[in-house]
């Protein structure tokens, strides 16, 4: 058993001060390699996941990766008083190793955990005596004494399993229907029966999982009395024939994929009574072409709160629904400006007094408001963003939230009292970027923090932010996986450059040990798309250090269109993807070329997904600026991408075809005159492989030379493959680092 670590932290900067003698014993080990970067244990240290406090607060449960298999997770528990730790469920001993259903595989792909094994989620029973554990397609109930009961044993598997709020049922989706099973024992019963074919109950449709951050399709009312259930029918959605090309054969899937401008699923919402089987349909309005984005119950269970978004994503309505009749009234609405959209959020909380804590960008920045008796009170304000509502202490009237109030590159934890709007107090330490979770009663915090010199570490804190004890100190000292590489670790630096209109753009850079008068090649990485901030004062992958060890300067910046800088900064891409982002990245390249230590003729660019799209657009727009580029899994035709994401920014292609033509990467493919490497997984169901084949065909028809590396059987996550990075490094060395002088 391990005890709480209460001594002082030895971070990376402090460890560097120890000197190189401690790390010089094994020179070979000091050299980073791709095998080591992608190997086990994780170079950034063991990182716990899904940390929760038990209902009585006596235990902290977490998922921990195995030391010899960093992608396999087991369930552990710590005593919050003594720090004693024990494994509750060993995934190898309890699990069967059975293959997951195709539906669960796709859910994991949507959640970006497709490569994880073992236990990836769990749910505490409300009495704190047991924990529901999904594992290898079946459900288990783990008890605190180490006993584990198997609840299901079916070939199809169970999706979206939870324990109901009062602990009466285990619920799950099986064969596209919603089932409930008494937690105390008994057979599972189907609450719905017509699921099958194109009809699904209790699941989230593709775009809800991929683009709305909604993973489930059913929601229990307090007391287990009722459950709201989504029913969707995929019949209207177009069928895309997708070939999953593997090493030894090809599987052809007829996939229902809602491409931009085409029909979505038909969505309905019902309220079911698990005791009687009663069913009431919720009135979602007269327009069937809408998105069901969020569903919640008020604390008393008397009202169902439903968020409905129009197809154009310019209006979000909050409905208050009578569960007995299904009748809905519009409580309030959020509307976007003329050249913008409404961003979805999970940063809201229904209060016991009938009011609502709500996040909105109505003043141009994301802030918290209270809606009570038809009136709005703004609780936070300023040219900064609230990014996460962490907890609500209703007794004290206090909110806990993450924001970038003090520095756009840092996420800090703050608190504000509802009775004293805008009197904001920071609870975490500057110089770090943080994330936090709280228990439902908002009595304690679990804070995870990192900075450029310290991999993520996690601690338990009280409501003032005071650290009560380490959950994972993760100090980089002897025994830590990264410790042998400290001698070669290079610092990250941050700064700003000016966009064409004078807007500050934040960049980060890592340089190798430089010699006076020498000029260095640049590995210019970019993403560029919305909802992704890449430049932060947090720990980054050791892969960046490997890039620098190969003699490159590592550089990236966040362009306009990226989040956390306010709505005006983000809205620049509206109906114009692939324009302002390309201009801002060009400003970064021009700034680099002016630096005395940069070789202006040896700047190579790399990006994956939206970043791959950016590589193509940057090479098309600015021939001769870059030595070459790598485009990984790029979108090349936005008409091929899904409705909710694409139409949010680009509108309907049937209405604004010219905007799509301009934003696509296909039309100008022949303008690429610099070296290009195109990389794609051949089983990608997110950015489908057709994006790259269509682009390749255009380049070949125009007789433009380029290189390709396609990966049989690989999905959108192919970027994690060692061979991908071997290919990229070989390409950069040949095309960028060793480029003949012009």
Image (cartoon, rainbow, N blue to C red):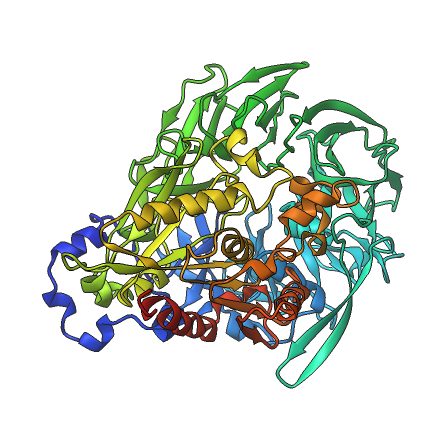
Q: Is residue 89 visible?
A: no
Give the side of residue 243 with respect to residue 90, left or right.
Answer: right
State the quadrant of the N terminus. Answer: bottom left
Name the one closer to the observer, 571 or 454: 571
Q: Position of residue 365 (x, y in %)?
A: 51, 27
* Residue at figure coordinates x 48%, y 58% from the top left: 607
Of residue 713 and residue 710, the one placed in the foreground of this image is 710
Q: Is residue 259 above or below residue 711?
A: above
Query: From the viewer's perspective, is residue 697 above or below residue 465?
Result: below
- Residue 498 or residue 237, whichever sits in front: 498
The residue lying at 64 percent from left, 58 percent from top is 666
Residue furthest toward the front? 742
| Residue 296 showing in the rendered view | yes
Image coordinates for residue 722, horizontal then vertical, percent: 44, 73
Asked if residue 479 is positioned above or below residue 572 in the image, the reply reads below
Query: Viewed as shown, does residue 685 lie left or right of 585?
Result: right
Q: Residue at x 61, y 16 (%)?
A: 376
Q: Which of the 4 image quarters holds residue 222? A: top right
Which image quarter is the C terminus in? bottom left
Q: Position of residue 61 (x, y in %)?
A: 47, 53
Quadrant for residue 314, please give it: top right
Judge whether 463 appears above or below 201 on screen: above
Q: Position of residue 718 (x, y in %)?
A: 53, 68
As rendered, which of 662 and 42 lies closer to the eye?
662
Q: Is residue 477 left or right of residue 33?
A: left
The tally of labels here is 0
């Amino acid at each position: 058993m391990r005890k709480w670590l209460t001594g002082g932290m030895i971070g990376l900067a402090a460890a560097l001060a120890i000197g190189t003698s401690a790390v010089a014993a094994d020179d070979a080990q000091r050299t980073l390699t791709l095998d080591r970067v992608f190997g086990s244990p994780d170079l950034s240290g063991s990182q716990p996941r899904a940390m929760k406090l038990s209902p009585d607060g006596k235990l902290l449960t977490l998922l921990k990766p195995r030391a010899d298999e960093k992608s396999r997770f087991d369930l552990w528990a710590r005593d919050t008083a003594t720090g004693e730790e024990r494994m509750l469920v060993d995934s190898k001993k309890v699990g069967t190793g059975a293959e997951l259903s195709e539906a669960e595989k796709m859910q994991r792909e949507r959640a970006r955990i497709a490569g994880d094994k073992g236990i990836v989620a769990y749910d505490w029973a409300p009495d704190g005596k047991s924990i529901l554990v999904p594992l290898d397609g079946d459900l288990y109930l783990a008890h605190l004494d180490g006993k584990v009961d198997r609840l299901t044993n079916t070939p199809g598997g169970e999706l979206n399993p939870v324990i109901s709020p009062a602990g009466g049922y285990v619920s799950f989706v099986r064969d596209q229907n919603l089932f409930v099973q008494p937690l105390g024992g008994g057979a599972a019963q189907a609450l719905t029966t017509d699921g099958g074919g194109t009809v699904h109950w209790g699941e989230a449709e593709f775009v809800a999982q991929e683009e709305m951050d909604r993973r489930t399709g059913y929601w229990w009312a307090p007391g287990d009395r009722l459950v709201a259930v989504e029913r969707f029918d995929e019949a209207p959605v177009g069928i895309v024939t997708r070939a999953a090309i593997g090493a030894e054969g090809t599987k052809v899937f007829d996939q229902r994929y809602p491409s931009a401008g085409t029909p979505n699923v038909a969505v309905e919402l019902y309220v079911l009574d698990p005791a009687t089987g009663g069913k009431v349909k919720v009135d979602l309005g007269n327009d069937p072409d809408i998105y069901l984005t969020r569903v919640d119950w008020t604390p008393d269970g008397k009202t169902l709160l439903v968020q409905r978004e129009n197809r154009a994503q310019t209006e979000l309505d909050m409905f208050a629904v009578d569960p007995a009749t299904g009748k809905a009234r519009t409580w309030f609405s959020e509307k976007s400006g003329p050249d913008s959209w409404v961003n979805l959020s999970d940063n809201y909380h229904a209060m016991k007094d009938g009011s609502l804590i709500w996040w909105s960008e109505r003043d141009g920045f994301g802030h918290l408001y209270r809606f009570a008796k038809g009136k709005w009170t703004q609780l936070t304000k300023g040219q900064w963003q609230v990014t996460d509502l962490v907890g609500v202490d209703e007794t004290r009237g206090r909110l806990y939230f993450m924001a970038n109030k003090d520095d756009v590159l840092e996420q800090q934890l703050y608190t504000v009292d509802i009775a004293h709007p805008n009197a904001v107090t920071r609870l975490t330490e500057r110089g770090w970027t943080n994330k936090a979770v709280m228990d439902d009663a908002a009595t304690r915090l679990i804070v995870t923090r990192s900075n450029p010199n310290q991999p993520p570490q996690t601690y338990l804190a009280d409501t003032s932010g005071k650290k009560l004890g380490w959950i994972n100190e993760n100090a980089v000292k002897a025994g830590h996986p990264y410790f042998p590489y400290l001698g070669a670790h290079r610092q990250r630096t941050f700064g700003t450059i000016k966009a064409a209109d004078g807007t500050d753009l934040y960049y980060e850079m890592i340089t190798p040990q430089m010699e006076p008068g020498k000029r260095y090649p640049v590995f210019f990485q970019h993403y560029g798309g919305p909802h992704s901030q890449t430049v932060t004062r947090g720990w980054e992958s050791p892969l960046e250090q490997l890039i620098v060890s190969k003699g490159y300067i590592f550089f990236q910046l966040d362009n306009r269109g990226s989040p956390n800088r306010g709505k005006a900064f983000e809205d620049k891409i509206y109906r114009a993807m692939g324009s302002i982002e390309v201009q801002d990245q060009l400003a970064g390249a021009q700034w680099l070329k002016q630096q005395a230590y940069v070789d202006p003729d040896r700047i190579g660019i790399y990006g994956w997904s939206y970043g791959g799209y950016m590589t193509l657009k940057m090479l098309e727009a600015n021939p001769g600026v870059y030595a070459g580029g790598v485009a990984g899994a790029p979108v090349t035709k936005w008409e091929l991408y899904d409705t909710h994401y694409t139409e949010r920014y680009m509108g309907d292609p049937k209405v604004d075809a010219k905007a799509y033509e301009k934003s696509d990467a296909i039309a100008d493919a022949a303008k690429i005159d610099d070296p290009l490497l195109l990389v794609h997984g051949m089983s990608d169901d997110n950015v489908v492989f057709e994006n790259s084949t269509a682009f390749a065909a255009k380049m070949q028809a125009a007789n433009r030379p380029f290189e390709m590396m396609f990966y049989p059987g690989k999905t959108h996550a192919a970027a994690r493959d060692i061979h991908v990075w071997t290919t990229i490094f070989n390409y950069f060395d040949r095309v960028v680092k060793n480029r003949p002088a012009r």
